[in-house]
Image (spheres, rainbow, N blue to C red):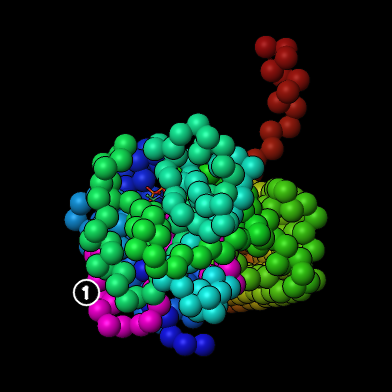
Amino acid sequence: MASLAAVVLAAGKGTRMKSRYPKVLHRVAGRPMLAYVLDAVESAGADRVVVVAGFGLDAVRAAVGTRAEVVCQEEQLGTAHALLQAEERLAGEKAEVLVVCGDTPLLRGRTLADLVAYHREAGVTATVLTTRMEDPTGYGRVLRGEDGLVRRIVEQKDASPAELAVDEINTGVYCFAAEGLFDALRRIGRENRQGEYYLTDIVSLYVREERPVASWVAADPTAVMGINDRVQLARAEQILRRRIVERLMLDGVTVIDPATTFVDAAVSIAPDTVIYPFTIIEGETAIGRDCIIGPQARLVDCRLGDGVTFQNSIALESEVGDGTTVGPFAYLRPGNRIGARARIGDFVEMKKSVVGEGSKIPHLSYIGDALIGSGVNVGAGTITCNYDGRKKSTTVIEDGAFIGSNANLVAPVKVGRGAYIGAGSTITQDVPPGALGVARGRQKNIEGWAARKKDA
Ligand code: UD1
Ligand code: CA
């Protein structure tokens, strides 16, 4: 494929979002809208991509990173003015310039590639990507002449009632011959209801100058949907989420209820894993095969091995090894590394802790800043006292140790290999390997006490 330049218009504030943040950085399925648009133009073959940014410039620049060049549109005077800002970068670059808006996250690379191929074949000056919408409200309407050719695009705010009735809309995606494009943009005025330089006016301008303008009708209107407010954002989220979950299912993952399964775009899940309802899997989470996830699981930026069972629990930035069981009702805060065939049971909270192979923390524990070896049993109600009010300290529990129920391990402290801790102990000193550490009041039984109390 011949090389192609692309410009992404992303300088607008997105007033209708009512947000402090630039519209194109609002997230859909865990990624900024702009990231999807960049995916689409890249996969359509664009090898020079310029993003026009303005509102929230630094944040947009950071989100774009090295994926594209960023130029600044100081004042947002309209889409034609926005595209003009890319002129310097594209001077003499490529034969065609693909223009897309940064607020169309559902765009597919394939649609763009089809548009460009059609444009090249037709040998026209401009090709507009249009579609038909059941409810075209808010979009520019595509007006065709009697010959069926596109003559003009009229914005919602400037349209007559008859024009508003047209259901063919401008998607905001165009392919232009680079030659003469920027000169034409400079001839666009701002005599319209919004006082903006409309890129859409280039259509009537080219038609007047008898330069050929074509159109390509996208079959799927949802894929070209522009996001202007948060209602549309949620709609896009729903569509994209559906796409993601369907992709997972086609790749071998069982999803019991797609409607209540929320998976971010960057998540990977291996075949034969089963996802139960009401589950949210976010960020860069990677899950192995044969796992059982959910119901009601939330995983954010986690790595799970194969054969993991993770139900009714939350885990953030943690790793879980093969065959390990987590939950129900466990909370893994960031920084845990749980080994293989371990068990983290109900009402266990953990943070920044390492757990070795086959170790068990089955019930009601707080484990923070702990290094736990393999084959360790941590009894119900065990607490690592990792914070003295000023600093956090580490608890070390070596291989094969047995911590009796309801123990307090006051860090820094170390329980040696194979040592035992008596139930109910508050351990403040290291326990040597193989020893028994007990630290609690001795029990005394007072015979006949109850009867004497009753008589008194
Ligand atoms: C635009 C089109 C409309 C089309 C719709 C498709 C114009 C005049 N109208 O309307 O025909 O149906 O998209 O979704 O082009 N932007 C800038 N600088 C500016 C203004 C906008 O970079 O000065 C960017 C925005 O960040 C946004 C994109 O251009 O990503 C579109 O702007 P927006 O205000 O959303 O245009 P619409 O009213 O949706
Ligand atoms: Ca828009």
Residue situated in front as seen by the camera: 48 or 169: 169
Answer with left or right where residue 192 lies relative to residue 325: left
Can the viewer see residue 411?
Answer: no
Number of labels in the image equals 1
Q: Which residue is mark 1?
A: 88
Residue 231 vs 52, above or below: the answer is above
Q: Quadrant of residue 310?
A: bottom right
Residue 157 lies within the magenta run: no
Residue most toward the left?
74
Can the viewer see residue 133?
Answer: yes
At 39% from the left and 65% from the top, the residue drawn is 210
Residue 184 vs 92, above or below: the answer is above
Q: Quadrant of residue 341?
A: bottom right
Tell me the kind of residue under disc 1.
Glu
Residue 173: percent from the left, percent from the top?
46, 61
Answer with left or right where residue 96 lies relative to residue 29: left
At 53% from the left and 59% from the top, the residue drawn is 149
The region drawn magenta spans 84-113
At 60% from the left and 60% from the top, the residue drawn is 217
Question: Tag 1's secondary structure?
Answer: helix
Residue situated in front as seen by the camera: 348 or 43: 43
